[in-house]
Image: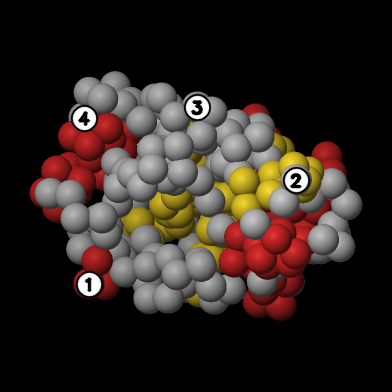
Amino acid sequence: MINLYRFKCFEKYSNLLHAVTNKSMNFPYGFSLALHTSENETEIINNRNILARSLQSDKSLHFIVANQTHSDHIQIISKKETKGWESLENAIEDCDALITNEKEIVLTILTADCVPILLYDREKEVVAAVHAGWKGTKAKIVAKTVLKMKEVYGSKVENIIAAVAPSIGACCYEVGEDVAKHFFDIPKAYTQVEDKYMLDLPYINKYQLLEAGLSEDNIEMSNICTACEVDRYFSYRKEQGCSGRFMSMIGLK
């Protein structure tokens, strides 16, 4: 049995499936789901298959995994096929946001501190999964994903619900001015401690969603810091370079 974190804002929609995985020392590598960090591939794939079964879908699901590169590149998924689930070789290349309106496709994001954001247009039946580290946040990838949903599917911002999954919080994310300067124009984006800055990436992504037109009532924050909750989530910073990654995912039944 594995533990999954779920968002209240999504649970009331019976046609939607979503989850954020937790660490578990009952499984290999603490239930890491990353194929790109040199663990035994067979054991990671087995972890992934355990996760897939836990979603309890009565139909066959197709999982999409991207080769995340801290870019602002967005990929529309229009075919029912699995990508990057059992091999890195056919993962979506150089991509940090995925969008689809196809049923039985599960979009995934792998993180260990960066900000995963899940989006759902409840009217047009469109889902998206976004990976936003500081570089992706600087590039406003989440706002660009909302714009792409509008352009491709005719989504209206008032119908889009967003969930910001566990990620490193301002309590633990210390950066230099070289990083913080990109967010100086955003109120409450950081607190300064001498020559260091405690950057609030989850809040900045929420700010960008609000700037994109989403209602605050339609944005749910997990308010979980991966570094503070390192017993439940992988944290690259707290663990000083961990190889584990947890997965945030969303799809349409």
N-term mark: 1 or 3: 1
Q: Mark 1 points at which residue?
A: 89
Mark 1 and mark 3 in contact? Answer it, CB < 8 Å.
no
N-term mark: 4 or 2: 4
Quarter in which the N terminus is drawn? top left
Mark 4 and mark 2 in contact? Answer it, CB < 8 Å.
no
Q: Mark 3 points at which residue?
A: 229
Color style of the picture: secondary structure
> As displayed, is residue 224 above or below residue 71?
above
User: What's the amino acid at mark 1?
Assistant: Glu
Q: Residue at x 59, y 66 (%)?
A: 135
Q: Which residue is drawn at 22% across and 23% down?
A: 26
Q: Position of residue 252 (x, y in %)?
A: 51, 51
In this rendering, does residue 120 appear at all?
no
Q: Is mark 3 on a helix, strand or loop?
A: loop
Q: Which residue in the rendered view is the most extreme toward the front?
A: 194
Q: What element carries label 1?
A: helix
Q: Mark 4 points at which residue?
A: 27
Whole-number angstrom distance, CA of label 3 to CA of label 2: 26 Å
Residue 172 lies left or right of residue 60; in this view the side is: right
Mark 4 and mark 3 in contact? Answer it, CB < 8 Å.
no
> As displayed, is residue 64 above or below residue 249?
below
Foreground of the two, 142 or 77: 142
